[in-house]
Image (cartoon, rainbow, N blue to C red):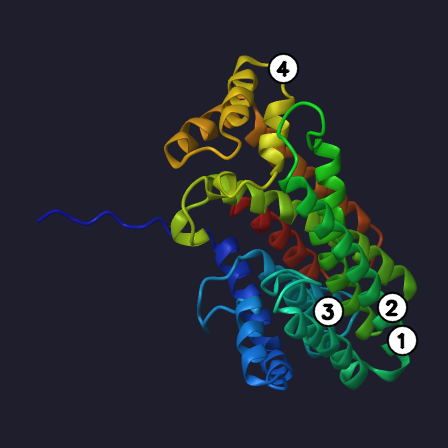
Amino acid sequence: MAVPARTPARPVTARRTEELLRRCRELIRPELESAVAQLPGPSRETAGHALGRPAPGGPPGTGRDFCPALAVLAAEAVGGSAGQAVPGAVAVELVHAFTLAPGGPGTGPAVPTGDALLALALNVLVRHARRDRREDAMGLLCQALSALLRGQARDLAFAARPWRGAGAVTPEEYRAAARDSTGALSGCAAALGALLAGGDERCVARLATAGRQFGLALRISDDLLGLWGDPARTGGPAGGGLSRGGKSLPVLLALAAASPAAVRLAALLDDAGTPEPEAVPRALRLIEEAGGRARATAEARAALARAGRALDGLPLRPRIRRELAALADYAVARAG
């Protein structure tokens, strides 16, 4: 009798990181659900979709799973407890959901839900943040929201711009938008975790910097997942990130290369704009041949290295340092 092929076991470090993500996700779930329960029925349903919360025990490792973990680890890094990070982590999740409400912030029928989510985020800090840190916590959240909206506005503008020629999106423009969106959210999560756990100004600033660099790496790895990720984990088809028409760093870096593959890729994208489904595999091959995948992966790892350097000199316990390093490695490794 033939023996069925076994699925390779997840590396021990990856399994531990996934357990950390689950633990942090479950830690904030009660407070998150309590906040959303305050909304009226239709808005509550819309908010649930925007939050995109997986079922208990569901697979971790989506981009939004990392912010609660960053907040918790930052709180523990300054000698606090995981529970002290919960108000900050919940507030960041609600702000993220505000930007994801159908129609986007400021437009369409989802405006009441989006506005309500933003109000809930501020209310969580007013009600649950420690009194002596409340004003600073709200300031951090508002700064992150401002940057996040700026980044989203850039991303929306990118979608209407060409891949090549006059008006094309440059890799540096992409990086600026990524720092303002995912970077701002991740930096805020880390800063709030440290602040609410009693961290001093230096620790909060360093952890915020590390969080922003982590967010940049996370955004790039999400782009890589959108192109080459396993559909079983991403929930979408291979190459889905290309067919959706958004500007992603691997494609921008491939187009910037001086190579025959870059020229063929440019012709394919210029002809189709958004490739037809049957052309996506060819586009993916050309992106890889032009070096887009390798260069984007290198940029993600460089951002993680900058995050690590931001923590140099902080008196982190060995366990916290290991878990932060493992979380960073996992964020990029999940993209293959």
From the image, tell me which residue sits under label 3. 76
| Image vertical order of residue 248 relative to residue 86, above or below | above
Kindly report the distance in space between the C-alpha atoms of the residues bearing marks 4 and 1.
51 Å
**Tag of residue 258:** 4
Kindly report the distance in space between the C-alpha atoms of the residues bearing marks 1 and 3.
21 Å
**Tag of residue 139:** 2
Q: Position of residue 84 (x, y in %)?
A: 74, 78
Kindly report the distance in space between the C-alpha atoms of the residues bearing marks 3 and 4.
47 Å
| Residue 88 or residue 154, whichever sits in front | 154
The amino acid marked with disc number 3 is Glu
The amino acid marked with disc number 4 is Ala
Mark 3 nearby-residue class (10 Å; few <14, some 14–19, many ≥20) = many
Q: Are marks 4 and 1 in contact (CB under 8 Å)?
A: no
Residue 131 visible within the image: yes
Kindly report the distance in space between the C-alpha atoms of the residues bearing marks 1 and 2.
6 Å
Name the element at disc 1. helix
